[in-house]
Image (tube, rainbow, N blue to C red):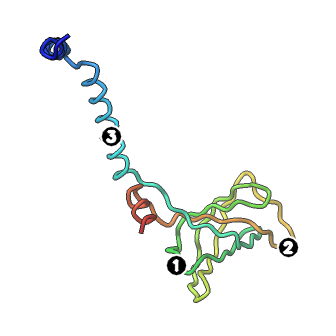
């Protein structure tokens, strides 16, 4: 087969092919990329500040957080007792100190309240401090 015949066959094959499958695949790839990009910039992911230095009493709790936290009175919080019981709470008082932020909580009654004990129990507290887009989280991580 000579070069001219091979070239003619290639041109005829390209003319006969309408590239339908690659066009459909490219369309769905662009659609998926557009949806992911939209999610990357518009989704809001909650950012939590967590403390394991928490003293839990029957009706109140107190915790220490790092000094750079953005915690204000009135923010909702969730406390997980050593027994694994989730307790809804609200930030009552915030005291900023050089060594950290001291937070007092008011506990809301729940159907599963921890049993009162004479000694304060150790537990963990989580407070939602911000909502950020995934793009801003990535940018903060690479700085």
Q: Residue at x 53, y 70 (%)?
A: 74
> Of the numbered discs in the image, which one, if any, rests on residue 33?
3
Nearest-to-viewer mark from 3 and 1: 3
Disc 2: which residue: 119
The first of marks 1 and 2 along the sequence is 1
Earlier-in-chain disc, 3 versus 1 = 3
Q: Residue 121: x and y, percent?
A: 80, 69
Name the residue furthest right. Answer: 118
Q: Earlier in the sequence, mark 3 or mark 2?
A: 3
Q: Are marks 3 and 1 in contact (CB under 8 Å)?
A: no
Q: Quadrant of residue 20?
A: top left
User: Residue 77: percent from the left, percent from the top?
Assistant: 59, 63
Residue 59 image offset from top left, x and y in percent: 72, 68
Q: Residues within 10 Å of mark 3 (few under 14, many from 20)?
A: few
Vertical placement of residue 53 versus 78, above or below: below
- 70 horizontally vs 21: left or right: right
Residue 95 image offset from top left, x and y in percent? 58, 84
Q: Quadrant of the N terminus?
A: top left
Looking at the picture, tell me which residue is in the foreground, 118 or 125: 125
Badge nearest the viewer, 3 or 2: 3
Residue 51 appears in the rendering: yes
Which of the 4 image quadrants contains residue 99?
bottom right
Count of numbered circles in the view: 3
In which quadrant of the rendered view does residue 67 lie? bottom right
Contact? badges 1 and 2 (CB < 8 Å): no
Q: Compute the Cα span from label 3 to label 1.
A: 36 Å
**Mark-to-mark CA distance, 3 and 2:** 55 Å
Residue 72 in sight: no
């Amino acid at each position: 087969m000579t070069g001219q015949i091979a070239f003619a066959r290639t041109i005829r094959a390209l003319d006969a092919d309408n590239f339908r499958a690659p066009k459909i695949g490219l369309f769905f790839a662009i659609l998926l990329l557009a949806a992911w990009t939209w999610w990357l910039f518009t989704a809001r992911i909650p950012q939590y500040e967590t403390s394991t230095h928490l003293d839990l009493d029957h009706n109140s709790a107190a915790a220490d957080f790092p000094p750079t936290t953005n915690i204000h009175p009135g923010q909702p919080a969730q406390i997980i007792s050593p027994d694994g019981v989730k307790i809804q709470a609200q930030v009552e008082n915030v005291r900023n100190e050089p060594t950290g932020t001291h937070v007092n909580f008011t506990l809301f009654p729940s159907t599963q309240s921890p049993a009162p004990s004479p000694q304060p129990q150790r537990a963990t507290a989580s407070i939602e401090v911000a909502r950020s887009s995934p793009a801003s989280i990535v940018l903060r991580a690479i700085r």
